[in-house]
Image: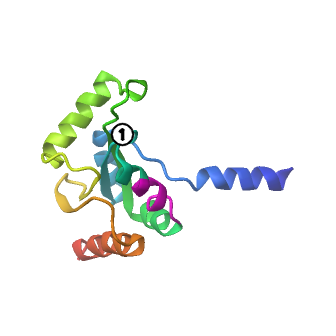
Amino acid sequence: MRLLFSIFTFFFMSTLQWGNNYDQAIQTAKKEHKYILLNFSGSDWCGPCIKLHKEVFTTDQFELLAKDKLVLVNADFPRYKKNQLTSTQQKSNDALAEKYNSKGVFPLTVLINAEGAVVKSWEGFPSSTIDFIDDIAQTIQDNQK
């Protein structure tokens, strides 16, 4: 029984948590000396967005990078009424889009330093999962010098 509990606990502890509170992410990034990875998605209508979350953000390689270097924030823009955000969350996501995604690109992934400045951004679904993750890691490394 203990083994089963340990496996269960490890499985749920190892999954990454995407937040939706940017101000809290900034505080965490400053405190933990990390970068923010902000992802703009349409979770119920944007095929490449859904694919990015399923095929890239769930990989072991991404998880290792994220746990060590990133605070994850998802700015979701669902279209279906059943997935509607609270008005407070919608206002927050709209403000993030105004600041970081004025062109309305989906998906858009933005690497932001702890001061809120854009370090680099990626539009669309990457052609290579490994290259995308390596590019994020290399960008962080280059900016820590």
Q: Is residue 119 left or right of residue 68?
A: left
Q: Is residue 118 left or right of residue 17?
A: left
x then y, percent, for residue 88: 29, 25
The one of 64 and 56 positioned closer to us in this rendering: 56
x then y, percent, for residue 16: 50, 53
Q: Residue at x 25, y 33 (%)?
A: 92
Q: Which residues are magenta?
A: 51-59
- Looking at the image, is 11 positioned above or below residue 21? below
Please give the count of numbered marks on the rendered protein.
1
Q: Residue at x 31, y 73 (%)?
A: 135
User: Circle 1: is it few (<14), some (14-19), or many (20+) Cα within 10 Å?
Assistant: some
The part of the image, by quadrant, that contains residue 134 is: bottom left
- Looking at the image, is 42 positioned above or below residue 125? above
- Looking at the image, is 39 positioned above or below residue 22? below
x then y, percent, for residue 115: 19, 53
- In the displayed image of the protein, which residue is found farthest to the right? 1
Q: Which residue is mark 1?
A: 20
x then y, percent, for residue 2: 83, 52
The part of the image, by quadrant, that contains residue 132 is: bottom left
Q: Residue at x 80, y 52 (%)?
A: 4
In the image, what residue type sits under mark 1? Asn
Give the structural element (helix, strand or loop) at label 1.
Answer: loop
**Which quadrant: the C terminus?**
bottom left
Q: Residue at x 21, y 50 (%)?
A: 105
Residue 7 counted in the magenta span: no
